[in-house]
Image (cartoon, grey):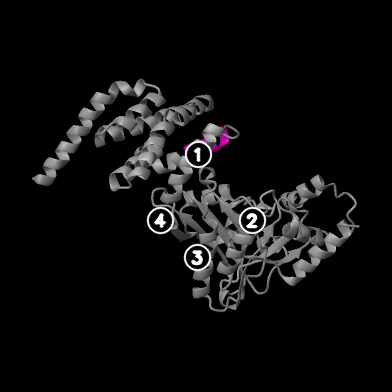
Amino acid sequence: MTVLSDLLAAVLERGLGAARLGDWSRRPAAELADALITTHGETSGNLLAEQVLAAYKAMDDHARQEFFQHLATEMNVAPDVARAALDAYEAEPSRETYRAYLTASEPPRQELIRRLNQIEGATGALVEMRGDLLRLGRGQPELEALDLDFRHLFRSWFNRGFLVLRHITWKTSADILEKIIAYEAVHAIDSWDDLRRRVQPDDRRCFAFFHPAMPDEPLIFVEVALTRGIPGAVQPLLAKGREELKPELADTAVFYSISNCQSGLAGISFGNSLIKQVAADLASELPGLARFVTLSPIPGLMEWVREAGITAWQGDLAPLAAHYLLNVKRPNGTPRDPVARFHLGNGAMVHALHEDADLSQKGRAGSGGVMVNYLYDLRRTSERHEAFATNGTVAASSGVKSLAGSAQATLNK
């Protein structure tokens, strides 16, 4: 009877809460958000959260930008209150003064985001909301500051400990397979047959991270080819009618495509964990694997060539690509190429360069057809990660260093 009584009480409370909040459904989302941040009842809070998210979903971009402006300004930190709380803690450190400081230094919009996330399906809606914020708030300091609150919370919610690694196969649900096709960002999947060639053969694998709150939405996925030797071109890996290799005969696992799926999770890094987890799992399954490498594009190469005014370059592009990867930096000292930053930051090294490796229009436009192998030596990834993060050290093979040196000498003439 106790369970039944509790159930009836909950249903009654929700019904009464809905009746009390009925008029709120026609209020602006900003007012609903203000009410949510001050309400104390769980049921009324959940109902308000549902209405905030429903109201937001119905908005156009202009209204969404106004909503973000409200959160950025009206739910910001009060500097004088935070300053006073810090002074009190400094004068007399205690549990109470520290708690008061933490409360004062956290903007109310962080608590709003937490409360919104308490209802079913809210995590995915908030990821989409942050995607809108990144798109609409670019170049607006107050909205970029608001994004730091989303990012702070998402880094906890999407911690590696919460993520689930799933092997994507031809038997995976059609809904998820359709999303793999849509989200592929490196080498477009142009048909279901193309997808089948990437996930069904025994020497091809695909793995994705999922979050329990978004079970049907891949966050990031990697496509893997099991090969003998390190490949120097991507089209043969994707070709129709290629000869399959028995997995136990493979000595190399090639990560040839890594795609982030959710724009609202930009800056929340999963790739490092994904590659290392997949490499560890494959090494356990197939002891004959001796190498783990990527076959990666160099998407900023041709843009840099144009900007640098290199119009009279003669000969192969590989030396120029090596120089670009090893020596061309952003103002903060990190490599200009975004793919290089990702893999070097994960502890990989620049292993080899290949010309005419991607003959697609996208590959020629961005990389001049050149591709690069980044080598993941699982025994040294931590060491190389630390060297890159601390000193900006770019690990590279002697062959790549020699290519970069020859290009440097030519450019200095």
Q: Three-letter amino acid code at disc 2?
A: Arg
| Residue found at x 46% / y 45% | 152
Q: Nearer the viewer, residue 212 or 250?
A: 212
Q: Three-letter amino acid code at disc 1?
A: Asp
Callout 1 touching callout 2 (CB < 8 Å): no
Callout 4 touching callout 1 (CB < 8 Å): no
Q: Quadrant of residue 397?
A: bottom right
Q: Is 194 placed left or right of 95 in the picture?
A: right
Q: Which residue is mark 3?
A: 277
Q: Three-letter amino acid code at disc 4?
A: Phe
Q: Which badge, 2 or 3, comes first in the chain's sequence?
A: 3
- Give the residues in magenta: 129-136
Marks 2 and 3, Cα distance to the nearest angstrom? 20 Å
Q: Is 368 placed left or right of 281 in the picture?
A: right
Image quarter in which the C terminus is found: bottom right
Q: In the picture shown, does residue 322 fall above or below 141?
A: below
Marks 4 and 1, Cα distance to the nearest angstrom? 22 Å
Q: Which residue is mark 1?
A: 147
Q: Which badge, 3 or 4, comes first in the chain's sequence?
A: 4
| Residue found at x 50% / y 39% | 147
